[in-house]
Amino acid sequence: MALDDTVVGNIDFATLTDYEILDHAFNGSDGFKSGEYIVPHWRERGQRYQTRKNNAWYLNVFKPIINAHVDSLYKTEPQRDIQSDILSRIEKDIDKKGNSANVFFKRATREATLQGKTYILVENSVNPDTNKASAIENRDLPYLVLITKNRVDEDKTEYDKFGNLLKIRYYTKRMVNGEELKTWKTWTREKWWVESEKGDIQDDGDNKLGVIPIIQYYGTDSDDLNPISDFFQVAKAAHRLYNLTSNVQEQEDNQMYAVLTLPKTSSKDQETLGTSNALVFDPKASKGPAYISPPVEPIKILIENMARLVVTMYDMSNLAIIKSQSQTSGESKRWDYEKTETVLSGRALSAENMENQVWKMIQLYFGGGEEVEVSYTRKFTFIDAEKEIQKAIDLMEMNLGPVGNAHVKKISVYNAFQYVGKDTMEEIQESIDEQAKVEETNPNNFIDDVEPIE
């Protein structure tokens, strides 16, 4: 049976941009919320399809996958060596909205990870306060603005042969008297200007920095200026999972109640089946009253496919360690751990590089000054704590001497407290070294308690 004319609203993925596919999958918005991303079966009638859209719900596995890649980078706070009062004030409120550097950069990292690329504008006040104390108190200092990929007009954005920005155009939106207005801002290395949607110049000025104050933040290891997100196909898989969930729900509803069959001469009520009536058949048939129900095999297959698809999505995202590994060998687990740590370390390196560029750009507004050194953790190993503790105990029982024992202790502490701050870890390591020095001066540490054989 073909679809009738009442089936409307189903959205073809070909009409969506890459940004929309990823954004909708992450937030569970638009077609995932309205049901428009439910693909109708070719025999599905309009009203039945509409009901299925209304009842659809989104099993959002995609968002935790993205968050797992980002949260791990900021579970241990990035270490920043900031000596300037002005830069410390900026760090505490980096976007003039009250968000700290950690909050802003985590959001930027999530956007870059999700979309493959995002932009960070380092903006300054139009007429910055020249009094240092007053500027700090009133937060009249440079601030950051996140420019998402979908806001940039790539057709009017230019790069040099190294991929550095020569010109960029992006839009902003604001509400004026209840009406949403869009304006476009263009930056070059010499000047900037703002124009309306109609092309009228509303404001302009010179770019005294000599460089475009926008950092390109890449969330994927690619030379492309407009790279495809590492998670694009995972987002497509999320769409498939959404439809599988709906299909399972539909079959569960249809198979909830068995149908009673009765021998009867009249065919009335054959099409109004439910728990209070029956399907009738010719009494001359060699069959008595009975209950019938649809086969359960199709729904079992769908549920198995859903489970496999979820695991596949984690595998595609290099997060295989999150799946159930009750039957996985130790060697396979170790490989999964190393693969995940390698991916996360790469993302940490990109985030560190991005933030260092941002702080250098901020310093340009002050004519230079002390550089801010930023470092992100590279330690993401998922450790079997019980095994590591037992291994350390076994080594300590061998009494490897003050230096050897100290080394075992340091490794154990590093594994056990891998998410503590850098300063705290250094204090613990120094304490272990001091303890080792004391043990070196104590000759009793090397006395053999075993009586010699006479």
Image (tube, rainbow, N blue to C red):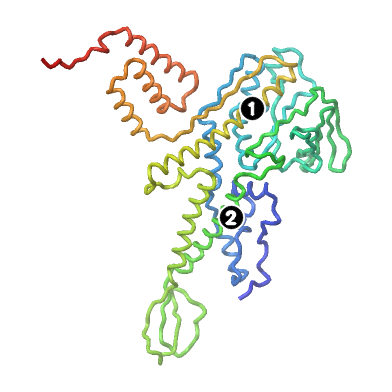
Looking at the image, residue 125 lies above or below residue 307: above
Provide the residue designation for mark 2: 239
Q: Amino acid at mark 1?
A: Glu
Locate the C terminus by quadrant. Answer: top left
Q: Estimate the x, y position of residue 15 in percent, counting from the top left.
A: 71, 56
Camera-side residue: 343 or 446? 446
Furthest toward the right, the residue is 200
Helix or strand or loop: what does disc 2 sit on?
helix
Q: Residue at x 84, y 42 (%)?
A: 197
Camera-side residue: 8 or 72? 72
Relative to residue 117, is residue 244 drawn left or right? left
How crowded is the residue under tag 1: few (<14 C-alpha within 10 Å), some, or many (20+)? Answer: many
Number of labelled discs?
A: 2
Q: CA distance from mark 1 to mark 2?
A: 34 Å
Looking at the image, residue 447 lies above or below residue 301: above
Furthest toward the left, the residue is 454
> Quadrant of residue 391 in the image?
top left
Q: Estimate the x, y position of residue 137 in percent, counting from the top left.
A: 67, 16
Whichever of callouts 1 and 2 sits on the residue coming sooner in the sequence is 2
Q: Residue at x 27, y 8 (%)?
A: 443
> Quadrant of residue 120 in the image?
top right
Provide the residue designation for mark 1: 355
Looking at the image, residue 291 lies above or below residue 170: below
Q: Estimate the x, y position of residue 138 in percent, counting from the top left.
A: 70, 19
